[in-house]
Amino acid sequence: MTQSWVVFYVSSHGFGHMTRSLAVIEEVMEKTDYYVYLVCGKYQNDFARSYLADYKERMQFKDFQTDVGLVTADNSLVVDARETERQLIDFVAKWEDIVAKEVDHLKTRTVECVISDISPIGALVGNKLNVRTIGLSNFTWVEQYEYFYLKQDIIDQFKTAYAYFDEFIEYSLALPMESITVPKKKIGFVARELDWRKISDLKQYYGSSIFISCGKAVTIDNIHVENYSGTIFTTSGVTVTGSDHVVKLPVDTLDTHNYLAASDIVIAKAGWGTISEAITANKKLVLIERESVLEDSHNIQCLTNNHVALSIKESDLGSLDIMELEAIADRKISFERLNRYTNQQDKVVDMLGLN
């Protein structure tokens, strides 16, 4: 029997692109007979290998850099535009060789489609293979790099690559993407499945808790909490002082979303993946402002305007009064509106035409 493959190229910038892609891949595995070829950075793929262990007979992985994304300054959430540009010049120069090797690897397989979130490599490979190629994201790097006034020839290379998509599926909270002119479909939030039994066990064992994350691509060590006696869950790269009840989740923790869902309040940078997991779990959400990042600013504006989240400045992390923060959240977050967002979860297989 011929094996039919769905090919994923996932951005190796941070972890949010991978975690939301894992939700999609899980659905593909559970609802179809397709095999999946997943390409991303080794750091992200090692996580995916463990997370998708139950499906290993139908999975193949390839490890390499698929994106540069946005490079941040040391111990900060601030983007270093010049270093981002420098790394992009090196990355774009490698595209032709990367694509040729991927096409050679895949050309003898039956490929149903190529899905990219939101690496240009996926669009380029899909075009060369002459198979249906789908963009799946809430933004592209075009508008992100235009925001920083990066070199036009870099931006034009990304525009050219993305023009090879046959269609684009736009997640909730999507940025305006004028460079994407192919047919678009809209979809709500997607997130990894929650384990409600484990969530209940975590609540019973740890009691009241909060969840603090700045993403696995960022290191920040100036978070100081006050007026809180419960448990604080943190992800890698985050150092919290002011409490004796900090549980630092190991970098290889497969289900950080369950710890998030067990918490009373989530404090995080405004990446789409964490927002989606928090909203899916119906959590009070406090987002850390990064005016230098277009996606974050857009997400924060949409959610605060609709009274489903609060925002704080990065400088506020040096003195976080949790009691005061929770009181403000209770006043300003509308749980009626949050429930509407929570119910915007979508299944992706039908949208991708893979059923």
Image (cartoon, rainbow, N blue to C red):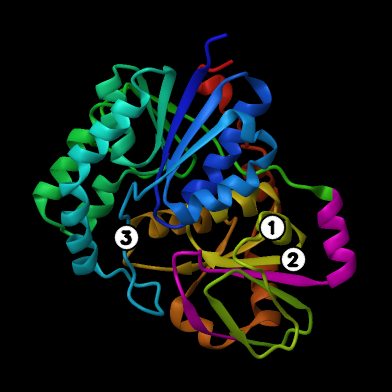
Mark 3 or mark 1, earlier in chain: 3
- Please, what is the three-letter code of the amino acid marked with disc 1? Lys
Residue type highlighted by circle 3? Leu
Q: Nearer the viewer, mark 2 or mark 3?
A: 3
* Outermost top residue: 1
**Spatial separation of the CA atoms under disc 2 and disc 3:** 30 Å
Measured as percent of width and height from the top left, residue 149 is found at: 16, 58
Q: Which residue is mark 3?
A: 70
Disc on res. 264: 2
- Give me the residue at 56% from left, 70% from top: 236
| The C terminus sits in image quarter | top right
> Residue 216's x, y, as percent?
50, 64
Give the magenta-colored segment's residue range: 197-224
For image coordinates 56% across by 33% down, the residue present is 59
> Residue 351 lies in magenta, yes or no?
no
Q: Is 79 displayed left or right of 354 in the figure? A: left
Q: Camera-side residue: 348 or 40?
A: 40
Q: Residues within 10 Å of mark 3 (few under 14, many from 20)?
A: many
Position of the N terminus by quadrant = top right
Q: Is residue 272 left or right of residue 259?
A: left
Identify whether 189 is placed above or below 212.
above
Q: Is residue 314 above or below residue 65?
A: below
For residue 15, say whether it is visible.
no
Residue under pointer 1? 283
Rendered residue at 41%/80% (across/down): 75
Residue 95 picture quarter: top left
Q: What kind of residue is marked 2?
A: Asp
156 or 284: which is nearer to us?
156
Q: Please tell me which of labels 2 and 3 falls first in the chain.
A: 3
